[in-house]
Amino acid sequence: MATSAPTSPSSNIFDYAPAPESRAIVDIKPSYGLFIDGEFVDGHGSPFKSINPASEETLAEIAEADEADVDLAVRAARRAFRAWSRMPGRERSKYLYRIARIIQERSRELAVLESIDNGKPIREARDVDVPIMAAHFFYYAGWADKLEYAGLGANPQPLGVAAQVIPWNFPLLMLAWKIAPALACGNTVVLKPAETTPLTALLFAEICQQADLPPGVVNIVTGAGGTGQALVSHPDVDKVAFTGSTDVGKAIARAIAGSDKKATLELGGKAANIVFDDAPIDQAIEGIVGGIFFNQGHVCCAGSRLLVQESVAEEVMEKLKRRMGTLRVGDPLDKNTDIGAINSAEQLGRIRALAEIGEEEGAERWSPPCELPSAGFWFPPTVFTGVSQAHRIAREEVFGPVLSVLTFRTPSEALEKANNTPYGLSAGVWTEKGSRILHMANELRAGVVWANTFNKFDPASPFGGYKESGYGREGGRQGLAAYLEHDTKAGA
Amino acid sequence: MSAIVSPGLAAYADVTASEASLRRFLHGLPGVDQVGAEARAAGLGTRSIKTTAKAYALDLAITMVDLTTLEGQDTPGKVRALANKALRPDPADPTCPSVAAVCVYGDMVGDVKAIVGDRVNVAAVATAFPSGRAALDIKLADTRDAVEAGADEIDMVIDRGAFLAGHYLRVFEEIVAVKEACRRSDGTHAHLKVILETGELQTYDNVRRASWLGMMAGGDFIKTSTGKVQPAATLPVTLVMLEAVRDFREATGVQIGVKPAGGIRTAKDAIKHLVMVNEVTGPDWLTPDWFRFGASTLLNDLLMQRTKLATGRYSGPDYFTLD
Amino acid sequence: MARIEVRKTYKLYIGGAFPRSESGHSYEVQDSKGKFVANAALASRKDVRDAVVAARKAFAGWSGRTAYNRAQILYRIAEVMEDRRPQFVQAVQQSEGGTAAAAGRQVDEAIDRLVWYAGWADKLAQVVGNANPVAGPFFNHSAPEPTGVVGVLAPQSSSLLGLVSVVAPVIVTGNTAVVVSSYGRPLPAVTFAEVLASSDVPGGVVNLLTGDAATLGPWLAAHMDVNAIDVCGVAGDIDLAVTLEVAAADNLKRVRRAPGAEPDWTVAPALSTMTDFVETKTVWHPIGV
């Protein structure tokens, strides 16, 4: 060769320099109140701190809503309901469009704050959370004046005040999944964000102000489990929407027993991601990686159980490990980061404990070499091989970047293993054979089946689980049903 | 049918022994899901490269350029100018490296060689480029002429008609024959790049199959396109070909180079390709021996970005030569 | 001497068979005027257990049948009921009192309701399922699927029309059911079981237990292999309804709550009678070449 390569700047021949997104765009106040009746007000519980999980730096002090504060918020929502529910749909729709547009305009700010408060990579906050959040508001904005066409009866009516409790894994996206359909249908809401990720919901409150949304239509109360409990069991709440753990979901189902409250519960999962020997292997590897390492594995529909056909298991594992070696773990604000920080010390403890149990139970643990930052909460992308259905890591939701690999021999064995779980939220199938995809999709007991893809979300696409993964659907036309009194209960 | 019988790569002698076994093998390669492949390519495209890594990447990209002119209107004067540019892409900056090669039609090899000598390679397109529609003996003569004129590298086109008709063995044997025609009197070979013309193959499944066909037949490089058919090189096509060379080395131990050509016009595009090479095949391919860009206008954009990085201000086309 | 009538002891209907209660207990069933009519098996918690096993076993086959086939079978039930109309009229009149004409109207309505639901089998997916135009190169489609094994506490008053109105919507979509009939008025349910046994309904698709909803309901509500429950049969007993709903939360059963009082079953049914016991499944696939 006549030419020779220039000298590489580092030991790794092509090491990317850090490309941090600027934090300057967000303005975090030292303390935040509750958002009730269109205003920020003081809370009466004990304030708590929200920290940056990537550095453990305190970001702000957050008010805690006690029972009286929750009551104020529900009353504000009830007062606002009268006018909001009677407002012509086309007017409500314009408020939602307005909010959607502001979200787009302030998308960088929202994405950066989400990344700081949650620990997720800016790349994901920027490319997934915030754009889909805006899309949800756009989608449901368009429904507000078309509800009579939704196939839910000629004159569907809103339920009233919705109590909405959302988790820390997708703070903005879950907020959008809850608030957009509720408002489109004419309900008013009191929403409680998770105690570790309240900041973007409070920024959303500012967006409601900016949009001149009538006071009381959206109220945001911050706090932990106690606040959530006070909210869902408030007697003047007509609807409860919860996304979170199956245990809390069950507690809510018990708490509202015998009431007229309707409920939508989006709970845990232990999804099987099934790879057949005729799969498009390179795309399947991407699907496996995206399925479990997206958002640090803090995803209820994560493909946490890889079921791979024994005849290609070796090849798949080799390629998977090589691919995992290119994952970049670290500063969430670095645009090249693939895996950010674990959301809290508590969650990190849970992941570590389950991973240790996996080892104790005899599964083989592997992570690519990767240097983890010293401050903050981190867990490397991890895969367990030699896992069987009897292992706890194959049954329990880890909610972290931990993949369990099991093998199967035949389609029926794959189905049997995939369905052998109390959960039923999602599943993945990888094969080039069309009829097998349809067969698997038919037989899998899961609310979302991704075939030759994984972890795709869209406001037009209903999402929700079978069995202990909860009930009700969010997204799509089906998502409206959860917020409308759509047909008579009497008569059969 | 060709009378030339050459084994291609010994490891796949059984596979390439008959049309039937070759077909079974190629159709047994894992499929490529278009949407997934394109999403992966787009994802890699969002990698952000800064400062030192960027300076390195720009220089690396320059050394990987096969500076190309393949026009009916090419003249000795035109290709000599290009040859000079290949040697000194930025006359104002002696630290700027040379490109990898100058790529021309076979009859222009001598003109280029006279300028560049052994300092930059000379690549010649051959085998009835770009359509490949000619008798085999003509294609072989075309190849031999270029090699005799001093070409270091031969960029051949595969017979897409035969490929699309399912005559894989014919395509295979033709590549084998061209490789043989690349042999010099001293026993060495001109480097053989096999152009798949992916824009005519249409599907990524076909790109993967053609990649394996080219590698098994003894190609030293697989190259996306002639530049005469749209779309030419795209990130996902390069991705699929990089996966092929990666898997091929895993299977055989033999490393094959990749050359996207046509359509890569900006430094940004070039860097996206380098990021992809780094993450898909790993750094072993990050040298001009194993990765090339077939391009003409790309070079000036690389030079402009290089100057911007060095001077801190944006440059303009007037400051770079137009040859 | 007048002929001594043959008195019946009715049995349960589980997995397509008619077993006695596992406990061996039965209870006296009286007509609307308090006169002894027959003995009915008194189902126990173990009968609930067996019925759930039978329902689970039948689920894959029943949900796997074509919608067209399920429609035909539901229609077949209506045909057989029509055949045995006089028997149903007698059973309803005995249970509920009133005139034969009134009982006849109940029976006719029950038969018509079955015909109505039968037609839904191959239409519900078209009405509540849809293609979803997502923002990307993906085929995306949502369709309803049966929830699984559904516990049904049938209404206490409307012994036939009420029963049919809560059973038909559950099974037409492919669920299988464990049904606890009206305690005081079980005879139409028993006759209905005999009809089911002779109208191509696979064993285990409907399991009918005669007994006390207050006793059996908690076992059904707490059973971890039951996916949903309709507690209509405890309408009016708020405490019991709450207890059942709380127990049902253990595995997040879908609960169709009891109305405050037993509704007017002659009112046309709502779509939710079916959609309360289906799951929406959404399938994604890339679109490419």
Image (cartoon, coloured by chain):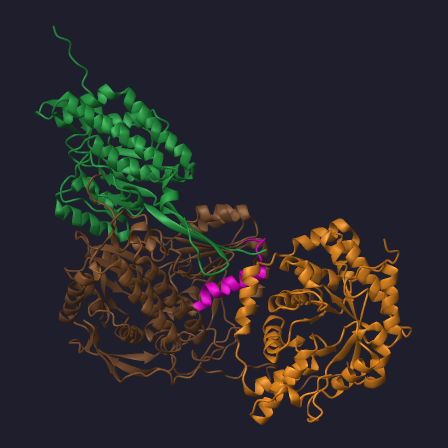
Chain colours: A brown, B orange, C green
At horizontal 10% and vertical 26% (from top left) the residue drawn is C32
Tell which residue pokes out farthest to the right in this image: B185
Give percent across and percent down for residue C221.
24, 46
Q: Which of C245 and A414 is in front in this view?
A: C245
At horizontal 35% and vertical 37% (from top left) the residue drawn is C120
Q: Specify whether residue A285 is painted magenta.
A: yes
Position of B18 with respect to A380 (left or right) is right
Give percent across and percent down for residue B132.
79, 61
Q: What is the magenta range?
A: A276-294
Give percent across and percent down for residue B218.
78, 65
At horizontal 41% and vertical 34% (from top left) the residue drawn is C68
- Work out which quarter of the rendered image holds the N terminus of chain C and state it: top left
Q: How many marks?
A: 0
Give percent across and percent down for residue B264.
64, 74
What is the quadrant of residue A325 in the picture? bottom right
Q: Which of C242 and B198 is in front in this view?
A: B198
What is the quadrant of residue A5 in the picture? bottom right
What is the quadrant of residue A121 in the picture? bottom left
Q: Is residue A349 visible?
A: no
Q: Specify whether residue A222 is painted magenta.
A: no
Q: Which of A423 and C21 is in front in this view?
A: A423
- Work out which quarter of the rendered image holds the C terminus of chain C and state it: bottom right
State whether residue A104 is above or below residue A464: below
